Image (cartoon, grey):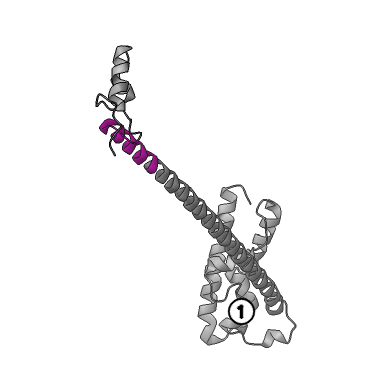
Amino acid sequence: MCSPRNRGGDTVLHVAASRALKHGEAADDFLPVDEDDEGFGDRADRIKKEYFEKKHAEAQRLASFSRLKKLKRREQEKESHKELHERLQRAARKDEETLQGRKRQYDEKCAATFNGSSSSENTKLSYSDIPWPAPRGTVQEMVDVMLHGLDRKYVWLFRKALRKQQVLWHPDKFAQRCEARLLEKDKRHILDTVTALSQELNKLAQKCRATALC
């Protein structure tokens, strides 16, 4: 649509521009301005700003996700440690109950075998009849059962209990009490185990004396 013209053929914009020049005003002030017009520099700045704002927001989301992931991992590790601790506690309780049971059986069998009635003195003893503290264990495990429940901080009590076991399993003392009752096929095995057990007890006594515990 064409701009209206006056009688001289000038458009309204030309007339306005002429008046502006007459009054010292710039003619460009009266030209229509496109508010969406944007220079290359401004457009580049805007694009960079939007890009970095987007990257910043993305980084914040990733950081938040990473924090949540780390928190979840810490919670899982904490739960795993708790479960492991509980399992170890259960295992320790079970081991303690097992040792207590073996110690009780050991004391009872010792009393029955070594301090039994006269009728039991005529009973022949096989290897399995001997009141070993840990029948299928090592001599160290046997000693652990014998002395289970004794606190080495109470020196005189520990020394007394250790001395009792040394006398009980001394090869000569044992032979005096039991050799005549041993089955011939098991005699050597029994006496060898008694000797090994006695030596382990003696080593423990020497160690205690060296560290001033006994």
Q: Residue furthest front?
A: 7
Magenta-colored stretch includes residue 44? yes
Q: Looking at this view, is 141 or 100 the one in front?
A: 100
Image coords of residue 102 (percent x, y):
64, 72
Image coords of residue 139 (percent x, y):
54, 68
Q: Amino acid at mark 1?
A: Ile
**Does 117 sit left or right of 198 as displayed?**
right
The residue shown at (56%, 67%) is 141
The picture quadrant where one finds residue 184 is bottom right
Image coords of residue 37 (percent x, y):
31, 34
Q: Is residue 16 above or below residue 41?
A: above
Q: Is residue 146 above or below residue 20?
A: below
**Does 6 sit left or right of 153 as displayed?**
left
Q: Residue furthest left?
A: 9
Q: Residue furthest right?
A: 117
The picture quadrant where one finds residue 145 is bottom right
The residue shown at (71%, 79%) is 112
Instruction: Say how many tags the image has.
Output: 1
Magenta part of the chain: 36-54
Q: Looking at this view, is 94 or 161 the one in front?
A: 94
Q: Looking at this view, is 9 or 122 the one in front?
A: 9
| On-image quarter of the N terminus | top left
The residue shown at (62%, 87%) is 124
Label 1 element class: loop
- Circle 1 residue: 130
Disc 1 residue crowd, few under 14, some 14–19, many 20+, Cα 10 Å: some
Image coords of residue 191 (percent x, y):
54, 76
The picture quadrant where one finds residue 168 is bottom right
Magenta-colored stretch includes residue 67? no
The residue shown at (73%, 87%) is 119
